[in-house]
Image (spheres, rainbow, N blue to C red):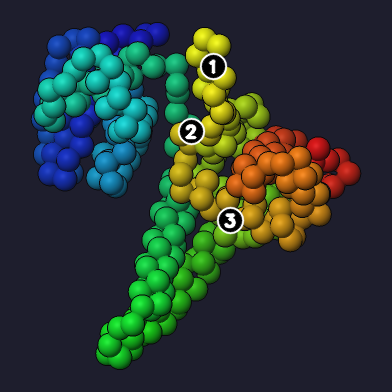
Amino acid sequence: MAQNGLVVAGIDIAKDRADVSIRGLSQRQTFASTAEGRRQLITWLRKHKVTKAVMEASGGYEREWAKALREKDIEVRIVDPKRVRHFARSAGRLAKNDMIDADTIAWFAETFGEASSQAHDAARETLRQLVNARQGLLDIRTGLSNKGEHDVPEPVQKSHAQLLKAIAVELAKLEAAIAAMIKATPHFAERAAIIESVPGIAGTTSAGLIAAMPELGQVSNEAISALLGVAPYDDDSGKRRGERQIKGGRRKVRNLFYMACLGAATRHNPALKAFYRRLIAKGKKAKVALVACMRKLIVILNIMIARGEKWDASRYAVE
């Protein structure tokens, strides 16, 4: 369908194929998940003058397709599957198969075409995968450590101990790779220097923000809070005034930022620590106060990166 002069295609990615729908032109086709299949898709899209392809995040299966399309100057937007599914339900589309999903993705993209994607950055995609791999190992380590708290046979204890040692080695390798990549990539290194100038923010948090929050410094303070998932939303109806709650956002980076803010607000950052204590003194619950600190800090980082300035406690007062 034409969208400001563009023709949009929806693509549903599976392990072995891609189902594609150009909804406005009533064109549908399936392509094998091979190099030849991707070439055929590009030819087909060009035949129908498609300049923008939209696909869901599909556990990594979308990466090769997105890369192939971008290399041929076809814009690619990767969207949240949950949003597409909620969109389909709200429209009364309850049936589901791969081609219907492709058509729904196209419909979603046509409806919300104003939400353009960030320009693709191959280096950021690599960094994101490294950061996610590190977090995956941390999750495994936590699971094993928790199991160690229970009474288990000695052979199991030894097995867990060996695995924990191996995980520690692999974590060190990944963290070294992440640090080396940031240092070797000028626009990453510049951002890292700004982010890590904030007391309490270390390299792992900085890497997570660089990988998962490319919008930092480019969008409004309200938008960056919403993207992180720390923006409070009203819950009112008529005369009822419900408690404001945070919703949505990017869970993985929010969890990472939460732990960093916990340390900054309670130990390492005097300005944030004072702000946190003022909120507690006003009767705020600890978690509510900490989320407020997260919101305050991500806004400050947004301003710092937009200005290209490092932390200055007198300039970035936490009030």
Mark 2, secondary structure of its residue: loop
Q: Residue at x 46, y 44 (%)?
A: 251
* Image quarter of the C terminus: top right
Q: Position of residue 259 (x, y in %)?
A: 58, 56
Disc 1 to disc 2, how far (Cα)?
20 Å
Which residue type carries mark 2? Lys
- Which labelled disc corresponds to residue 259? 3
Q: Quadrant of residue 41?
A: top left
Which mark is drawn over residue 247? Answer: 2
Residue 232 in percent (x, y) is at 58, 30
Residue 209 lies, with reference to residue 3, above or below; the image says below
- Name which residue lies at 53% across and 34% down: 246
What SS does tag 3 mark?
helix
The relative height of residue 216 versus residue 259 in the rendered view (above or below) is above
Q: CA distance from mark 2 to mark 3?
A: 18 Å
Label number found at residue 210: none
Q: Quadrant of the N terminus?
A: top left
* Image disc number at residue 240: 1
Q: Is residue 98 visible?
A: yes
Q: Which callout, 2 or 3, points at the residue further toward the start of the chain?
A: 2
Q: Nearer the viewer, residue 111 or 40?
A: 111
Along the polypeptide, which appears first: circle 1 or circle 2?
1
Say if 19 sits above or below 241 in the image: below
What type is the residue that disc 3 sits on? Met
Q: Nearer the viewer, mark 1 or mark 3?
A: 1
